[in-house]
Amino acid sequence: MTAPPAAAPSRARAAALLEEVRALRPALEAAARPAEAARTLPAAVVAQLREAALFWMKTPAALGGSELDAGDFCAVLEEVAHCDASAAWATMVANGSTGTMAGWLSDEGVAAAFADPADLPVFAGQFAPRGVAEPVEGGYRVTGRWSFSSGIRHADWVIGSCRVESEPGVERFVTVRRAEATVHDTWEVAGLQGTGSDDFSLEAVFVPTCQSFDWASATPRRGGALFRQPKVLFVGNELSPVAVGIARRALDDLVDLAGATSRTAAGTTLAERPVFQRELGRGAARGAAVRALYREAVGEAVSPRVEDRTPASGVRARVPAAVGVQHRPRSMRERERDRGTADGHLLHHLLNAAELGGRGAERLSARWVAGEQAAHRYPGSGGHRFLQGSFHHPKLDLEAGSGGLVRRARDNRQAAVSRHGSARA
């Protein structure tokens, strides 16, 4: 692992990480289709992300992480998303999950998980209370099953939120080594296929008290200003940069496609058509506006004033960033559907890079809609509780009861990969 020097300012550390991402671009792009076929990131790519220290941008410097400021973190994550949506999602989840444990877990728990500064751990899991923790001597006996645990195949530790028996209303985060959990192969979806967001379960697993904490009342035990903001903001600034990075890539791929596509004997490309240039300009302007909007929202939310705010105020501070998440993928989908400005059969090819990113944006956008609805139902939750419910595709019902659709989506994907191999559309 080659993390930037902790003593360097956040902006300098972010600049070094951006260079790492740019160096990894060919590998991330080449792994996009294999990741979809395998439904998780290839091991070689995970190793490269680890080596570049991209999983620990929210881990305190004292533990060996980069501990980037919120805005700098967003800049790096956005660049990963410009390379590949699934890699960005896995990077996002690893940072939020690992950073949460690194900042709030007890000293004894951190000593167990972060024992080797040269080999930092990766955490995965879910913050929704899908388990039950029974108090026993020295800790808790935990049983439960948690879904959508992105990156769990390459994680070292798992996190689950639990209701505590005999303590109504208390939710406790618990963490154990992944080897103590059972991972369930459930990730058959229509977008972000390469994220490996499988279920995991614990069955009467003993968790020492030091490997758990009450999320609502916990205070940060280490780290700087990043960990002093309301906790909901700590993991609340992650979706926007992923969405913007995906959309930036869609624009770039659209330009490449249009520049190589001609429908006339004279050889005039789509990119040379005034109507295409006009719509491209509109899309670029909308994208620049949304990017500025979410970055302003992140900056406003982590300003010194935020230290005195309640979590509910923090949720309101995230609203401008939510606009970015919703508007940018929507704009991208509108451009993809505009058959008059691009070669539709190329753009919608199942294995085309723009289509891969588009399906990822569909998933991300749907995730945010569900989170916003849950935030109204559970004030102060920041929308994270929506993970207790079902995962819906905006056009297809892919709940557990719709096994036929899930199987058809899987079969169609496998057939396409078999037909086209690794050829770039």
Image (spheres, grey):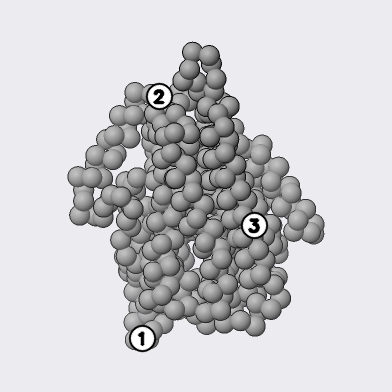
Q: Earlier in the sequence, mark 1 or mark 2?
A: 1
Residue matched to label 3: 292
Q: Earlier in the sequence, mark 2 or mark 3?
A: 3
362 lies left or right of 62 = left
Expressed as whole percent of the image width and height from the top left, the position of residue 312 reads 52, 79
Establish if 402 lies above or below 372: above
Identity, as a three-letter code, of the amino acid under mark 2: Gly
In the image, residue 304 sits, relative to residue 199, either above or below, namely below
Disc 3 element: helix
Q: Residues within 10 Å of mark 3 (few under 14, many from 20)?
A: some
Of residue 339 and residue 42, the one placed in the foreground of this image is 339
Determine which residue is flagged by label 1.
168
Residue at 51 percent across and 63 percent down: it is 322
Q: Which of these two is toward me, 286 or 194?
A: 286
* Residue type pointed to by label 3: Ala
Task: Give the Cα separation between the discs numbered 1 and 3.
Answer: 43 Å
Q: Is residue 254 visible?
A: yes
Task: State yes or no: discs 1 and 2 in contact (Cβ < 8 Å).
Answer: no
Q: Is residue 210 above or below residue 414?
A: below
Front label number (1 vs 3)? 3
Nearest to viewer (mark 2 / mark 3): 3
Q: Quadrant of the C terminus?
A: top left
Residue 373 at x, y percent in the picture: 39, 69
Q: CA distance from mark 1 to mark 2?
A: 53 Å
Residue 153 in view of the camera: no
Separation (CA) of disc 2 from disc 3: 39 Å
Residue that appears at 71% across and 52% down: 14
Name the N-terminal-most of marks 1 and 3. Answer: 1
